[in-house]
Amino acid sequence: MEKKTSATLRRVSAKNITQAVKKLFIDANTKLGKDVLTALRAGLKKEESPLGRQVLTRIIENASFASKAQMPVCQDTGLAVLFIEAGQDVRVTGGDLRTAIEEGVKLAYRDGCLRKSLCDPLTRMNTGDNTPAIMHMDIVSGSQIRIIAMPKGGGSENMSRAAMLTPAAGLAGIRDFVLETVEKAGANPCPPIIVGLGIGGSLETACLLAKKALLRPVGRKNKKDRRLAKMEAQLLEDINALGIGPAGMGGRVTALAVHAEMMPCHIASLPVAVNIQCHAARHAEVVL
């Protein structure tokens, strides 16, 4: 006879979720992470171009001022992108999870004086509150909710690309696609950039892998796959050899890091996606 076990159900109020999301987006937009600042300072030491050094110095000064003054690091405070891991043993009380998150985004962009950038694709009419948010939600084991807020600017997102390469393209084809994407982007995504690379799965999962790769601390190599770690290092070297430099003014530091993620794909396909992030690599997270 099977022994019945009962999981402990944890209750999280919708109000607490809303307030947490509000704080996440305000914090993410006003405070650059230590990993980003460390990478920018390391880039300043490597950069040989006087103009490139001047640009990097101003970027670092701007981040410091924004944090002290509680002002946005960049005027483009981005699309409200969220990654949510909801434990299967969590029950949201006083509302539902999606509505609570949407309300938090609205409050953040209203009370934090953040620019509202979301509009109808055809009429270009602004939605007025930066919603609906873009949510990627996973149901996981456990009794907690992990929320990652990722404001994503339009300048870098516009330079992102996806392609369905032939399997024969292999590593060389992936490398060429990444370099072509970065070279065509030029100064548009506000370099120095972070490059998120997604390989495998299907068209949409490659894009999601590329965006998730940007959540990794800047410069931390892939620890799960040595092949990807090697690819990241080589691609970073190749990208910086393009000479685009900070703000596209020329120099050695075009990218601060390349982060790659991969999953199996169909035998007939090789999906590849590049998601470019500007130097204002903003994200914040909370566990409830």
Image (spheres, rainbow, N blue to C red):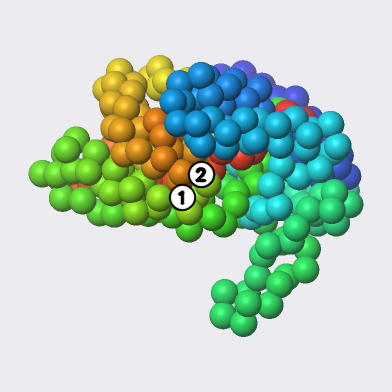
Residue identified by numbered label 2: 247
- Gap between marks 2 and 1 measured at Cα: 6 Å
Q: Residues within 10 Å of mark 2 (few under 14, many from 20)?
A: many
Seen from the viewer's position, the closer of residues 277 and 123 is 277
Q: Is residue 116 visible?
A: yes
Q: Residue at x 46, y 50 (%)?
A: 187
Give the residue type at disc 2: Ala
Query: Disc 1 marks which residue?
Result: 187
In front here: 256 or 160?
256
Q: Residues within 10 Å of mark 1 (few under 14, many from 20)?
A: many
Residue 226's image quarter? top left
Q: Amino acid at mark 1?
A: Ala
Picture coordinates of residue 213 (x, y %)?
Answer: 47, 35
**Residue 277 to residue 251: above or below:** below
Image location of residue 270, percent across then percent down:
23, 46
Q: Quadrant of the C terminus?
A: top right
- What SS does tag 1 mark? loop
Q: Tell me the quarter of the image containing the N terminus.
A: top right
Residue 262, visible in the rendered structure: no
Along the line of sight, the residue nearer the viewer: 206 or 268: 206
* N-terminal label among 2 and 1: 1
Residue occupying the point 50% across, 49% down = 189
Residue at the spot 29% in from the left edge and 43% down from the top edge: 179
